């Protein structure tokens, strides 16, 4: 008897797959009014993002930790004819929020354009099947729809990541699309009109300001929501703790989840270096060039879990975190090395119960 072929597990399932149970519960129990072609009401979308309970009692895990009003503004924007721009420094969950918004509203987060310096207008408009074009000439059959065109035809959300990484002339190809909700195809003398439910979510890294700034004409087509860094230490610790647990499970890391005190210690280091002073305000500090966001803290701890799983005893130690911590802080050796060394000598060394981390970090340098 032939063995049943196993279906390989994807490394990172899309949000609509990973949280299908929660999404289904919200959709099935949602009785509130919803915009046309939305899977659920705006109230349920916010519940999906911030956590709570569906009306049938299903527990909804939080996807975003932050101000409720910011998520309400983002969701309300997508119910209008204005596009949404999520802006902020790296690590403020812009991509994470855009993916979950698309999953909750359209049930599909895969319609995505990744902005790069080398992107062309075709990625935002359409391309051609050149073999068919040469054989048959221009026709609708030889047209290759971009993710944007697919979203317009199906009434779904399109995600455009790192908008400010795109050259200005490529950015401006969005102006007609966002203002008129049509995509002209002059080669075929036709235009693609957007179906109700279509809208666009873009993300922009404010650290990249000046790379390819948005024109005033394009910026007017967006409602901008600035996503801040976590307001408090506890909030940031909660974000890191939850995301590390999810990643450890998906990567099948057998090491125990990092103790809460280790997560708190790491997050505190990042917050102090980021703000340029110790948590009690007693000492001014130099800040490194790195962002030191929650995303980087998650990466350091996940790396530590991998070390503990494959090269340790299954329990995360200071030595497992030291290499990743040093690498996260020192991005520009000529500047950041001195900043990190000073912090180790003036802050880490003097703190009670931090001797293990001080020793491990010194060994790495």
Image (spheres, grey):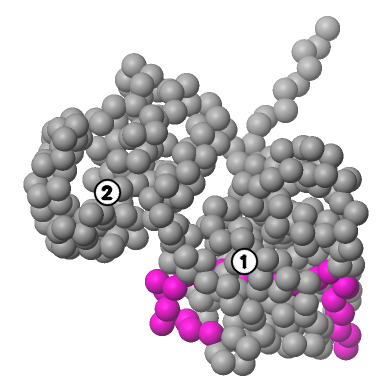
Viewer can see residue 154? no
Snapshot quadrant of residue 129: bottom right
Looking at the rendering, the stretch of residues picked out in magenta corresponds to 188-214
Viewer can see residue 133? yes
Q: Which mark is residue 56?
A: none
Give the left or right position of residue 86, taking residue 297 as reference. right
First in sequence: mark 2 vs mark 1: 1
Give the left or right position of residue 277, taking residue 255 as reference. left
254 is within the stretch colored magenta? no
Give the left or right position of residue 105, taking residue 29 as reference. left
The N terminus lies in quadrant:
top right
- Between 196 and 310, the residue placed more toward the observer is 196
Q: Which mark is residue 269?
A: 2
Kindly identify which residue carries mark 1.
69
3 relative to 193, above or below: above
Residue at the (37%, 38%) spot, across then down: 263
Query: Residue 231: image x %, image y %?
Result: 43, 59
Q: In the orientation shown, which residue stands out farthest toward the bottom?
A: 217
33 relative to 128, above or below: above
State the SS at label 2. helix
193 is within the stretch colored magenta? yes
Residue at the (56%, 61%) spot, across then down: 67
Residue at the (38%, 29%) spot, across then down: 259
Give the left or right position of residue 182, taking residue 252 as reference. right
Snapshot quadrant of residue 332: bottom left
Q: CA distance from mark 2 to mark 1?
A: 29 Å
Residue at the (38%, 19%) spot, across then down: 314
**Dot 1 surroundings within 10 Å: few (below 14), some, or many (20 or more)?**
few
- Between 196 and 349, the residue placed more toward the observer is 349
């Amino acid at each position: 008897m032939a063995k049943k072929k196993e279906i390989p597990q994807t490394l990172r399932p899309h949000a609509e797959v990973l949280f299908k149970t929660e999404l289904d519960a919200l959709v099935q129990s949602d009785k509130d009014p919803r915009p046309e072609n939305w899977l659920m009401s705006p109230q349920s979308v916010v519940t999906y993002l911030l956590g709570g309970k569906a009306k049938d009692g299903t527990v909804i895990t939080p996807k975003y930790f932050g101000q409720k009003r910011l998520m309400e503004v983002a969701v309300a924007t997508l119910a209008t004819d204005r596009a949404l721009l999520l802006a902020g420094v790296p690590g403020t969950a812009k991509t994470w929020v855009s993916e979950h918004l698309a999953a909750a509203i359209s049930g599909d987060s895969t319609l995505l354009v990744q902005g790069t310096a080398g992107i062309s207008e075709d990625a935002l408009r359409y391309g051609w099947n050149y073999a068919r074009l040469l054989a048959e000439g221009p026709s609708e059959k030889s047209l290759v729809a971009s993710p944007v065109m697919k979203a317009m035809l199906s009434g779904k959300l399109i995600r455009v990541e790192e908008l400010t990484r795109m050259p200005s002339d490529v950015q401006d190809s969005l102006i007609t699309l966002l203002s008129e909700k049509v995509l002209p195809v002059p080669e075929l003398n036709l235009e693609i009109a957007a179906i109700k439910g279509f809208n666009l979510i873009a993300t922009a890294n404010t650290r990249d300001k000046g790379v390819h700034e948005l024109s005033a004409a394009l910026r007017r087509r967006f409602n901008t929501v600035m996503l801040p860094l976590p307001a408090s230490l506890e909030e940031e610790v909660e974000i890191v703790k939850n995301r590390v647990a999810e990643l450890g499970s998906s990567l099948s890391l057998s090491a125990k989840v990092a103790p809460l005190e280790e997560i708190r210690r790491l997050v505190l280091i990042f917050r102090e270096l980021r703000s340029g002073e110790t948590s009690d305000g007693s000492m001014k500090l130099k800040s490194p060039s790195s962002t030191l966001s929650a995303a980087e803290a998650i990466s350091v701890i996940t790396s530590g879990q991998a070390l503990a799983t494959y090269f340790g005893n299954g329990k995360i130690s200071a030595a497992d975190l030291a290499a990743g911590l040093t690498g996260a802080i020192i991005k520009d050796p000529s500047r950041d090395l001195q900043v990190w060394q000073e912090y180790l000598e003036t802050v880490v060394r003097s703190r009670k119960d931090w001797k293990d981390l001080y020793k491990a970090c010194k060994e790495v340098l």
